[in-house]
Image (cartoon, rainbow, N blue to C red):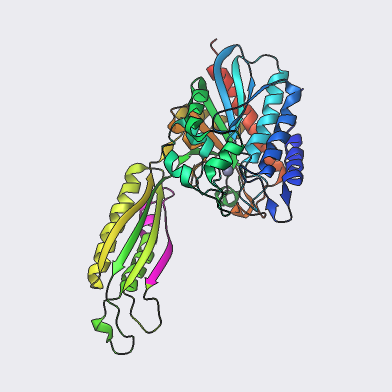
Amino acid sequence: MALEPGRTVDELRELRELTGDADGAQRVAWTDTWVAAKEWLSGKLEPLGVEEEIDEAGNQWFTLPGESERALVIGGHIDSVPNGGWLDGSLNVVAGVEVLRRIAQDGTPPVTVRLVSWADEEGARFGRSLFGSSAASGTMADQDEIRERTDANGIRWEDALAAHGVDLDGALEARHRLESTAAYLELHIEQGPVLEALGLPLGVVLGTFGVERHQITFRGQAAHAGSTPMDRRRDALAAAAKLALEIRGIAARTGGGAVCTMGSCVTKPGIVTSVVETATVLLDQRHLDGEKLAGMLAEAKEAGGRFAREEDVEVEWERIWRIDPILFDQALIELADEAVTEVAGRSHRLPSGPLHDAAEVARAGVPTVMLFVQSLRGLSHTKLEDTKPEHLELSVQALDRLAAKTMDRLSPS
Ligand SMILES: [Zn+2]
């Protein structure tokens, strides 16, 4: 029997009915609704006779044994943010079900094929993303911090994990699952406006952005708003404001999809009758090219210093977080391009701003690629998140083609 992409759209709607409400999807990891979604997924795959296992980090695996132990893995996440969209994460899982059906019906595949639903991609309840995939990739190094984390009701994460059969100390054992993995594929909604603006349904993802995140504090002198002449001020906000505008030029000059965001500015004393003494801003810079990212940071630091001198204030930088760009596999990118072109007529390569489970798998050294399908209005993490049904169907076809091409490539013969 052939692939039925329309069935994926029907099943996504079914999942939305089962696990959503008037405010959107409610499949927050480590909750009863998430468990209901996982059970629904098991029910969909049961007729295929695939082997189901939950690993040490709570990831849900379905295995279709092949002639070889080497495995092609298709992955996604069924958890959502609260009041989330119906497609973020679940599209890849439900599309993967359809691809597994097609492969199973074609007989024993040349390589083993697995579908994984990663546990807690979103980090919505405890504030740390990519739990299951970072355990499997071996990059999880913050168990002590995880142990202390609590949700909004004061429930400890470690206890919530235990209630779902996950022992935090053993979570890294999930690493063994990726040992035989020869390729990893993930289909996801774009969650941005690029493909829609280009009028294209599908794109191939080159990798995920490297990120530099800094807190910058400008320190001047609080002074009376009435009695301090303009030329005698040491206004911290003036320097911060100049930097807020400068980063747009830094991103534009760097190009290649560069983005720079100043997402917060807190001033003290923060009253209308005083010149600002301290302005603390948060800067987020992203690029797919590590050297360009470092260059953007250097430019921002130089500009921050220059503006501080101009305004006679001091400036201090503190790194909050950083991650290197994670590039996907060149050979798989080529195959994905072929698959998208066959299905949609034209392909487009683009970077991913958000991190994804696929980035964790790539960090573990597994050849990886992602497909993006257009998001209407670029919206995600809201109930307004949507994609045209015909584009969803194309995305299932593209994932299936890509899976077939990848299996061919991995086959011994
Ligand atoms: Zn997602």
At 35% from the left edge and 42% from the top edge, which residue is drawn?
290
At 61% from the left edge and 38% from the top edge, which residue is drawn?
163
At 44% from the left edge and 31% from the top edge, which residue is drawn?
138
Q: Is residue 375 left or right of residue 212?
A: right
Q: Residue 30, relative to residue 314: is it above or below?
A: above
Q: Residue 92, relative to residue 310: is it above or below?
A: above
Circle count: 0
Q: Looking at this view, is 38 or 143 the one in front?
A: 143
Q: Looking at this view, is 86 or 1 the one in front?
A: 86
Residue 255 magenta-highlighted: yes
Q: Which residue lies furthest to the top in this view?
A: 413
Percent of width and height locating residue 233: 26, 80
Percent of width and height locating residue 108: 67, 14
Residue 112 showing in the rendered view? yes
Quadrant the N terminus occupies: top right
Residue 120 showing in the rendered view? no
Q: Residue furthest bottom?
A: 227
Q: In this view, does 185 lie to the left or right of 264?
A: right
Quadrant the C terminus occupies: top right
Percent of width and height locating residue 287: 40, 47
Q: Looking at this view, is 289 or 71 the one in front?
A: 71
Percent of width and height locating residue 278: 32, 70
Q: Which quadrant of the picture is home to ligand 1?
A: top right
> Which residue range is magenta in the image?
248-267
Q: In which quarter of the image is residue 391?
A: top right
Q: Residue 241, relative to residue 385: is it above or below?
A: below
